[in-house]
Amino acid sequence: MERLLQSCRIQSQLVRECLAEFLGLYILIGSGAAAQVITSQGTHGSYLTMQLGSALGTVFGIFVTRGVSGAQLNVVWSMSLWLLGRQPWRKVPLYALSHLLGAFLGAATVYLQYYDAIQVFSGGHLSVAGPNATAGIFCSYPADHLSVWGGIVDQVVATALLLICCLAVEDRRQGLLPDGLAPVLVGALILTIGLSMGSNCGFPLNPARDLGPRLFTFIAGWGEEVFKAGGGWWWVPIVAPFVGGLLGTLIYELLIEVHHQLTPQSPGQESEAVELQDLCVWPGLHQIF
Amino acid sequence: MERLLQSCRIQSQLVRECLAEFLGLYILIGSGAAAQVITSQGTHGSYLTMQLGSALGTVFGIFVTRGVSGAQLNVVWSMSLWLLGRQPWRKVPLYALSHLLGAFLGAATVYLQYYDAIQVFSGGHLSVAGPNATAGIFCSYPADHLSVWGGIVDQVVATALLLICCLAVEDRRQGLLPDGLAPVLVGALILTIGLSMGSNCGFPLNPARDLGPRLFTFIAGWGEEVFKAGGGWWWVPIVAPFVGGLLGTLIYELLIEVHHQLTPQSPGQESEAVELQDLCVWPGLHQIF
Amino acid sequence: MERLLQSCRIQSQLVRECLAEFLGLYILIGSGAAAQVITSQGTHGSYLTMQLGSALGTVFGIFVTRGVSGAQLNVVWSMSLWLLGRQPWRKVPLYALSHLLGAFLGAATVYLQYYDAIQVFSGGHLSVAGPNATAGIFCSYPADHLSVWGGIVDQVVATALLLICCLAVEDRRQGLLPDGLAPVLVGALILTIGLSMGSNCGFPLNPARDLGPRLFTFIAGWGEEVFKAGGGWWWVPIVAPFVGGLLGTLIYELLIEVHHQLTPQSPGQESEAVELQDLCVWPGLHQIF
Amino acid sequence: MERLLQSCRIQSQLVRECLAEFLGLYILIGSGAAAQVITSQGTHGSYLTMQLGSALGTVFGIFVTRGVSGAQLNVVWSMSLWLLGRQPWRKVPLYALSHLLGAFLGAATVYLQYYDAIQVFSGGHLSVAGPNATAGIFCSYPADHLSVWGGIVDQVVATALLLICCLAVEDRRQGLLPDGLAPVLVGALILTIGLSMGSNCGFPLNPARDLGPRLFTFIAGWGEEVFKAGGGWWWVPIVAPFVGGLLGTLIYELLIEVHHQLTPQSPGQESEAVELQDLCVWPGLHQIF
């Protein structure tokens, strides 16, 4: 028996990390609360519960993943860590693929769990727009008032804010958080963005989280309208977050992190000095400048 | 006097644990907010407050219990811990019985506290369905749109998610949480499930939590309709969570826990190495394979 | 200058504690959110925000007080600590008086801050009942459906739950919480009770918190109706919480605390053994049996 | 490359702190949720989400800043720390200027992100009052019922409460909080004030946070009405918070902090004794008395 389990044990650290990132995104999507609010027509939730469900889903996605891969869960964050020289570049596409697969299967699970409810709510007709639209359960569509440029600005600003705050939470020169607080803070950050930047286009922020469920709805019966809607909106939440992520990383590094003193301030933190120097140098930007 | 108290002191660790589990479930049920929202017709709460009340009730059920029995509070979780070889099998039925008794008395206390309100709201007629139904205060009933298979899928998915996340929170290889954070996280998890998987059938997740109050309503005046409603729904929240619990345990173990390296990574965690090996072997599955 | 401050410094520990308890209750009342929700007719809040405001006010009342007097803030809790032999009896009435004064002045401050809003909302007529009633901003009144016995049961159950959970949070044999978590948990407990036991009579739970503001409204213009309303309701939230507090203390002690082993289980907790024995004996009950 | 970054590194501690305070206020404003709630006419949020967004924005403003300048983020708090002799006076105006600039640019970013939504909601007419008013997204205006004196009282009371509670959270004689909890508590405090003292005039509390966005709206098209509205309301949230801050500081110091014993109570805290003495003396008040 134990030999059987030993054979299940995967030696490759990278495969383990991809499995974890896959499961993290799966939970993040699978616990999204939009299906409940939309199909119950607001009797079982509100805009706040929808955002709270998403934020808490992110928290648990992180808790499931953090000990293995550090719970990146967003390729923009992976890219930022690579730019900052904190991980090799080849992790970025592999994690992105794991995220895409996890998001796709998460969306499939939501559809399975809400199959009855979606059928009744939509009258059996899976549509992207109109009063009985259900595509918004799975991925982002722009509000009527939003222009394409407005959507790009929205996603750039929101992702920049996400990255600035994540970098601050992770920055040990700002203070050492107790274990387990950082995931909760990231969830609170997602909630903040949802409550303050969610009405333009639903704050996708995460290319794989948006594309994976969109591909699922394309296959599962919503059809090619999921790519046509909003004037071909689908590429915005894939491209704009990278721009915002880069901008946010630059802002945080140039305004805060680059100015940290290299010598530790209190004697109790000496053992971290070497590691902190690693965090403060910025080799990844060789590729940019 | 102290001799009197000494005589009250129970030596048996198992009886102490059952008392604690009993009290934990009692608090979990007794602090449920559904009675308030339903009898006040929404003037004193909303769907969110109902879920928040339930989630926080769980948190305090755990705080009352955790130092004695580890606050299992759900026989599915007890089963999972037994399968993973972390506790003997005979605790599972004893805890389940304690849960059933605690949930039954918790429901009785809610009825006592809301006796006036329920009489006025229901016009003195205790019914399971219709506009003045009050049975939903105590245990789960499926929404109109839900088929039996849909209900089983819903409970399997939700309990699997519960177990995956609980195992991750308890998994010390993911990181050592500060004391007192884990109960809060479990409450947040209950809230997440309530906000994202609650509209199909009210996320019972816990056989004793559903059956105990159902038995109470059967006796207290709602009659045999509590077992007939929803096409004989009552057995689904008893059976499906076990399937979901098993599934969730397998997913977490196969995707995450079984791959943890047996040797500790940082020197500061050496003292835990032995215990962590215990957590990583999986003797309970001898019984399955 | 420093000599002037030295002259302000009060040597008596008891006076310092009473000052702190006074300020704690003052903040607890002063930050109550009922005035905002009622006078804005729900446009600036809801039932949830009212409860959240109260719960968070309690949290900050505790943070202001905890380092000086341990933040008792409720004479029922003071009584319970005395019964358990953890403080001398003479603190109970002194703290109660400080609470009464703090609650009275807190209510006065709320009236001052919302003077314009209350005048406009009530049309200048300060009434206890009716559509423009404003007395409910300050203290508890029973719902129409509630009988006096129902109110007593409600307060006994709610205060018992409060005490059980507070004793569990404070019980170091359940686990040592990080500093600062206990106040937040007590706030969460107040929120739980507000969301699940608030619709009968607004969960006063605390004699001084209810009587102080009631006395203020009696003087400030609402008149003797504040004592006549609800069939002479005013004495219930003064008497019933003591019964509930006693019941809750007995339940927690008999089901959980009295059974704790006197010897510490892990070597790391040896230094606490003596103190824990102090917590486990129960000299205060000499007076009862 | 690294030489380039070295040249970006700013040696002056004061400039670094001002950059951090600037970024903190920028995030605090930029993540405000009022734009979303107002332009979506409540479909994407409610009063609670607006307050929660503001409070969480404050939390992340603090996390971005705390390791560099201690995250003062409010000139009233800076003034209080100077009065208590905990920082030199020249930081107060410099921080205030950084706050003003951060708040101005934060408001500009909100306008940019919600440009489409504001145009559609307001029909292209940027107005301060009326059903399509949008100036309230950016800074405070008094409710119709509020007199100028009522507004001054409101701001004095609210800022006093803010200062009392912030001083208590920062007061290490009340207990040593785990790193990272204090910012969350300050956010919870902002939420408390928003839920209980927000309906009179929207709890500005912070001169720069109110003036910066007001200046932006003055320039961006709302015109001089932003200064005329509410009977020339604009100066109240600039002046009254200083009075309230002074009052709150005095209350906390005189009722709590000045009475702390100078000798540490437990041996484990000896190493802090010197520092705590520093906190307890009050040299800044030389300037007042």
Image (cartoon, coloured by chain):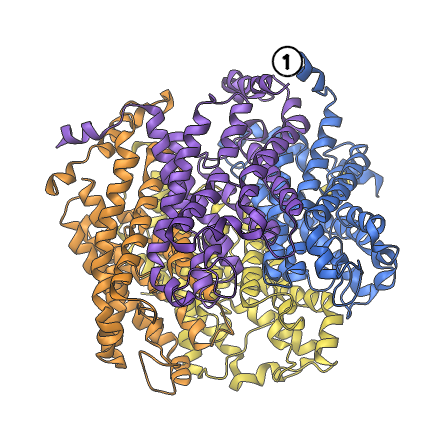
Chain colours: A orange, B yellow, C blue, D purple
Taking the spot 25% from the left edge, 56% from the top edge, the residue there is A241
Figure quadrant of residue B3: top right
Amino acid on which the number 1 mark rests in the picture? Glu
Compare residues A105 and A230 and report the one nearer the observer. A230
Is residue B193 something that shows in the picture?
A: no
Disc 1 marks which residue? C2
User: What is the secondary structure assignment of the residue under circle 1?
Assistant: helix
Compare residues D95 and B187 and report the one nearer the observer. D95
Question: Relative to residue D263, is residue A9 drawn left or right?
Answer: left
Location of residue B68 with respect to A26 vertically, above or below: above
Taking the spot 74% from the left edge, 58% from the top edge, the residue there is C136
Taking the spot 19% from the left edge, 54% from the top edge, the residue there is A15
The subunit letter for the residue under badge 1 reads C
Question: Relative to residue C14, is residue A206 drawn left or right?
Answer: left
Residue C92 screen position, x and y as percent: 79, 37
Compare residues D171 and B27 and report the one nearer the observer. D171
Quadrant position of the C terminus of chain B in the picture: bottom left
Quadrant position of the N terminus of chain B in the picture: top right
Residue A32 screen position, x and y as percent: 38, 65
Neighbours of disc 1 within 10 Å: few (<14), some (14-19), many (20+): few
Figure quadrant of residue D8: top left
Residue C150 screen position, x and y as percent: 79, 65
Compare residues C2 and D76 and report the one nearer the observer. D76
Is residue A67 something that shows in the picture?
A: yes
Q: How many marks?
A: 1
Question: Relative to residue A151, is residue C136 drawn left or right?
Answer: right
Residue B264 screen position, x and y as percent: 29, 39
